[in-house]
Image: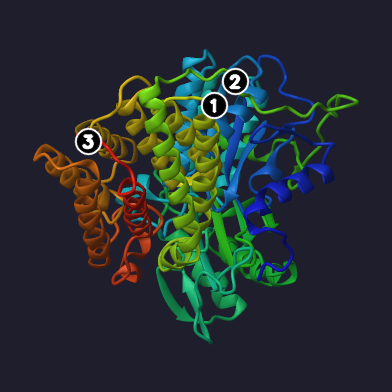
Amino acid sequence: MTRLFNDPADFADEALAGFVAAHRRWVRPVTGGVVRAAGTPAGQVAVVIGGGSGHYPAFSGLVGAGLAHGAAVGNVFASPSAQQIRGVAKAAHGGAGVLLMYGNYAGDVLHFGQAADRLNAEGVPTATFAVTDDISSAPADQAAKRRGIAGDLPVFKAAAAAAEAGQPLAEVARIAAHANARTRSFGIAFSGCTLPGADEPLFTVPAGRMAVGLGIHGEPGIGEAVLPTADEAAELLVAGLLKELPDGVTAPAGNRAAVILNGLGSVKYEELFVVYRRVAELLQEAGVTVVEPEVGELVTSFDMAGVSLTLTWLDAQLEPLWTAPADTPALRKGAVAPAAVPAVAPESTPETEDDALPQGTAASRETAVTAAAALRAVAATVAEHAEELGRIDAVAGDGDHGIGMLRGATAADAAARDAAERGAGAGTVLHRAADAWADRAGGTSGALWGTILHAVGDALGDEERPTAATVAAGVTRAGEEVRRVGGARVGDKTMVDVLVPFADTLAAATGAGDRLAAAWDRAAGAAGEAAAATADLLPQMGRARPHAEKSLGTPDAGAHSLALIVRAVHGVLSDTTEEH
């Protein structure tokens, strides 16, 4: 278990601060993460990688010459926010554009995509790429749904080496796609990991058994098998990967491969070497030539006891990129010419919006006070239920929903209160809260709650006193935007299964003439029923999808938290006198 921590909510920030203090030769801190201490050479594409904390040395430990130019670092097992990613990308930009790279998880896809949109709008040419190497997470004919695990490293390395060689952005992105198409990973685990502050691991494995096909966020495996010997583990991993060869590789014999045997946190190096001894023998027997293998902890999951094997099938283009020199805190290859490091590496300060808030009308300021009170109630409700939300999420996911929601709701409460006290209208209060929630929470929930609050804020504005119909229209718009941004539909076992019936009921009730508090009460009842009904659904999206059967009988964490939140907001509305 994770034993050394202070406040669990501060763990990721404090870990990053300690990492920077220990590795100033390679990195310097910037808003949202780290970049190379010496900066990006002028005219070179910047490869910016990122993801949640809890995977060291991914992602910050891979920043340095020959590898990443920067890393955006999110909360524990949660993607960094779009604002964090933007901050790192702007600090790393050397004038030739930015390639954002990450594992294929919903929160990362949302936040990195939003950051890319914003960077492109600001004149920074930006492309994105999600790694999809885990063969356990989806069948071969649905490879785009696969998640990224330890195969992140060879794909990041290929793209970064291409950037180091002076290739333009489009070519660096093409090489990333080519490396990803030729990379496959497969993992097993003997016990789950325990998040800072948690009393229990995210999953357990019965004595004498192992989980097969695990993720790197504490997700349980897709199956179980008898605990193997080291040789049997090697045989399982190699056989699994040799069953699925990428296009262009017709048989293992005669091919060359980069090989990574990755420890997930608690399997020690001597154990890994025992397993790798047999991996090397099996690959040799299959006729595969191994090129510069890596054995060690490269993409971890806190204290998870497990290993994964990655093969990247090399060709004339990929092999020199894999073997190219690199010098980072966690991975070093060959000899890299030392770069000039500033005597004092400046720490960036967060970019802030214009401190002069637009002032709302008297009517809108009254509504802003109510909105801020509602967000205060939301934060209190999330704090009360954070442990429960994490427990529900851990059934088939990574268990971080409670932590992320707490960070987001707390930040939104503070931002809303500040804006309301300074005379902002309701729309601005909700916009500030939305940005704070998305930035502090990260992850899928952060992006979607930012979307929800922005949509409602757009509807309320800073001028008029909103009617019940106006609020209902904003909630309806929020539901449309969440479906557009996240891609989920009703029945996929997500928050959409609650948001849509809540919005529909609210619109119908206000359309029938109900005052807002009464209409909200009816809609919150529908939300509660819809959240409970998600227990009977199988997830079609997100980290729970590969473990769909495990979640049967348990409601979706995002749906449950939304139902709790709208009920808490009703408590504020019922104490407020509102007009139609």
Rounded to the nearest angstrom, the CA distance separating label 1 from label 3 is: 25 Å
Rounded to the nearest angstrom, the CA distance separating label 1 from label 2 is: 10 Å
The residue type indicated by label 2 comes to Asp
The numbered mark at residue 355 is 2
Give the residue at the far right of this rendering. Answer: 343
The numbered mark at residue 422 is 1
Q: Is residue 297 left or right of residue 533?
A: right
Q: Considering depth in this image, is 232 or 365 the residue closer to the camera?
A: 365
- What secondary structure is found at the residue carrying circle 2? loop
The residue type indicated by label 3 comes to Ala
Residues marked 3 and 2 touching at CB (< 8 Å): no
Q: Is residue 462 above or below residue 20?
A: above
> Where's residue 75, x and y in %?
59, 49
Q: Residues within 10 Å of mark 3 (few under 14, many from 20)?
A: many
Answer with mark 1 or mark 3, whichever residue precedes in sequence: 1
Q: Considering depth in this image, is 365 or 106 the residue closer to the camera?
A: 365
Which quadrant, please, contains the N terminus?
bottom right
Quarter-of-image position of residue 5: bottom right
Answer with mark 1 or mark 2, whichever residue precedes in sequence: 2
Q: Residue at x 23, y 42 (%)?
A: 516
- What secondary structure is found at the residue carrying circle 3? helix
Which quadrant, please, contains the C terminus?
top left
The mark closer to the camera, 1 or 2, is 1
Q: Residues within 10 Å of mark 1 (few under 14, many from 20)?
A: some
Q: Residue at x 49, y 49 (%)?
A: 148
> Where's residue 250, x and y in %?
40, 49
The numbered mark at residue 468 is 3
Q: Is residue 544 above or below residue 508?
A: below
Q: Residues within 10 Å of mark 2 (few under 14, many from 20)?
A: few
The mark closer to the camera, 3 or 2, is 3
Rounded to the nearest angstrom, the CA distance separating label 3 from label 2 is: 31 Å
Residues marked 1 and 3 touching at CB (< 8 Å): no
